[in-house]
Image: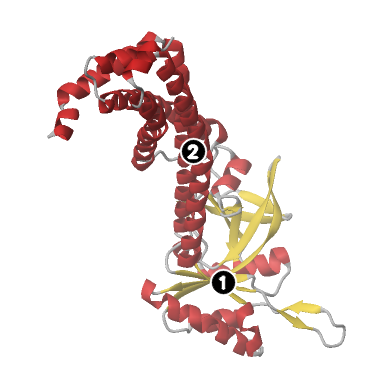
Amino acid sequence: MRLLRLFSPGRMSNYLFEAGRTLSSNKLRSFLSILGVMIGVAAVIAMLAVGSGANQQVQQSLANLGTNLIMVRTSFVQRGISMGMDTTTRFTFADYEALKKIDGVKTVVPYVQGRIQSVYQNRNWNTQVLGASPDYQSVRSSIPQAGRFFTNSEVTGRAKVAVLGATVAEQLFGSSDPLGKQIHINRINFLVIGVLPVKGSSGFQNTDDRILVPVTTAMYRLLGTDYINYFDVQAVDADSMDAVQSAIPPLVLRLHRLPETQFESIDVRNMADIQKTASEMANTFAILLGSIAAVSLLVGGIGIMNIMLVMVMERTREIGLRKALGAENVDVLLQFLIEATLICILGGLLGIGLGSLISFAISTFAGWNVLISTGSIILALTFSVLTGIIFGLWPAMSAAKLLPIEALRYE
């Protein structure tokens, strides 16, 4: 019953009214107290928004790469006998044909890549050329937004056709239509037959800044190579991923007559694992940023505690008078605790607004992806309330412990 009486609506409204009156009586001090919390909360909101935005962008970029995907590369070397030099074992079309025959494999895409100079009239652009097969568009979810992709017959015939990434199309053609135009790639004429949709950055690569050509064209007309750099292997479904991934290294070792000691050197990456790792790293990054920003909120809380201690000293006679008139220790405790909490709530609300503005500015001027979630707002408000309670508790207890006689004598 006593607890219900203390927290009755009537008493709580009186506490809030007194807290508001106290804060308004010294506006500058109240503003400075609120400012410390506001800056701390704004920093937390902005940093969490940057971290959450980074996580969202990573997930979106990885999702754009395709589903049920396994990337296969060679990371091993064979020791030369005569010269003692290292020579890297290369993938060939024999590997391509063998990978397609693994149980559970839906599609395999071979890749050859290199840097080239592309030219159209008086414009030129240094970019990546990526030789691939027609299955690229389905495996990487990259169906051209304009025009078409190259065909199997164009791969067989080493056709000089090109599909442009969105960035390359903009750099070479601006706002004009590139379809049907001739461009020069390393001084060789290519016909533009398609433009890929905007995909954005993935890891350290901008997937829009590339030109796709038939894999045979890249090998024999542009780059002068007779090997394949890496493969995308797409499983028929998620349940087949582990079995397919386990079958690839032994197959490659057998094809290249390599010892089992080279098993771990076959670089086989499951995109689901990559996505999980990237997500964990992004979440850790967000927590780190939020923790750094929380330090400023801690500083604001210490500032509130100092100001509340000063307020207790200034109001010592008032506290003594209230106790002499019948106020209990818990009444004084709650009064000062509510004042500290009210300061932090006001600072938290203003900080959320300021943090949102900072996040918007970061997104607008820095071009970063930011995401303000409901969870981050609730977290910021919760920390604001806890800051008021934790850092207001000591001053409130100090005020509650004052003896009425000694408080009334205080000058």
- Judging from the image, the colouring scheme is secondary structure
What is the x, y in percent for residue 373? 37, 41
Q: Quadrant of residue 29?
A: top left
Residue shown at the point (33%, 27%) measured from the top left: 337
State left or right for residue 253 relative to residue 288.
right
The residue most toward the right is 83
Q: Are marks 2 and 1 in contact (CB under 8 Å)?
A: no
Residue type, numbered disc 1: Phe
- Where residue 198 appears, x then y in whole percent? 49, 48
Q: CA distance from mark 2 to mark 1?
A: 45 Å
Rendered residue at 69%/69% (across/down): 220
Q: Nearer the viewer, residue 34 or 277?
A: 34
Q: Which image quarter: residue 332?
A: top left
Query: Which of marks 1 and 2 precedes in the sequence?
Result: 1
User: Residue 6 got which mark?
Assistant: none
* Residue highlighted by disc 2: 294
10 Å crowding of disc 1: few (<14), some (14-19), many (20+): many
Residue 399 is situated, as x and y percent measured from the top left of the image, at 36, 24
Query: In front: 202, or 3?
Result: 3
> Secondary structure under badge 2?
helix
Q: Amino acid at mark 2?
A: Ala
Query: Do we see residue 143 in this rendering?
Result: no
Residue of label 1:
231
Q: Is residue 2 left or right of residue 18?
A: left
Q: What residue is drawn where x is 37% and y is 17%? A: 406
Seen in the picture, residue 321 relative to 168 is either above or below; the reply is above
How many numbered marks are there? 2
Most extreme residue toward the left is 1
Please tell me whether mark 1 sits on a helix, a strand or a loop: strand
Image quadrant for the C terminus? top left
Asked if 172 appears above or below 400 in the picture, the reply is below
